[in-house]
Amino acid sequence: MNDDFQPQDDQAFDAFLNSLESEEAENLFDPSQVVTIRSTGGGEHVVPITDPMPIRDVLHQAGLLASAQIEYWVDGNAVASDFVVAPGATVTAIGVVKGG
């Protein structure tokens, strides 16, 4: 076991785990065949998709729960959860996203 990493708090540990998951997911999937969901809390989820789909379906496929108050941004524009994203897109979620 590696004793070099000693988390100072739960947020640091969560951020560390999210970074490992992101690096692992990036190595498993072609970046042009995924949608990346980034949260303002620093989390990142890479979701493989083959066809364009609404953001809410991408979240569901990833096992993520999002509150109704979440704002979504794609390419610098605010969009609704029914906005359709294609593989290769990056969605920034401002608010609380849980799960994964």
Image (tube, rainbow, N blue to C red):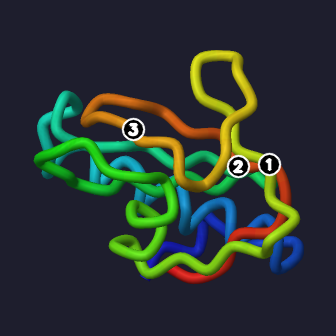
- Give above or below for 82 relative to 52: below
- The residue drawn where x is 36% and y is 43% is 35
| Identity of the residue furthest to the top in this view | 76
Judging by the rendered image, the residue that carries numbered circle 3 is 85
Residue at disc 1, secondary structure: strand
- Above or below — where is 77 with respect to 84? above
In the rendering, at what x and y percent does residue 18 appear?
55, 62
Q: Mark number for residue 71?
A: 1
As drawn, is 21 to the left or to the right of 4? left
* SS for callout 3: strand
Mark 2 and 1 residues: CB-CB less than 8 Å, in contact?
A: yes
At x 11%, y 47%, the residue is: 50
Going by the numbered disc 3, the residue's amino acid type is Val
User: Toward the viewer: 42 or 16?
Assistant: 42
21 and 41: which is toward the camera: 41
Quadrant for residue 1, please give it: bottom left
Q: Position of residue 82 (x, y in %)?
A: 53, 53
Secondary element at image label 2: strand
- The picture quadrant where one finds residue 57 is bottom left
Q: From the image, tell me which residue sits under label 2.
A: 93
Sequence-wise, the earlier of marks 1 and 3 is 1
17 and 64: which one is in front?
64
Name the mark on residue 79. none
Looking at the image, is mark 2 or mark 1 nearer the viewer?
A: 1
Dot 3 surroundings within 10 Å: few (below 14), some, or many (20 or more)?
A: some
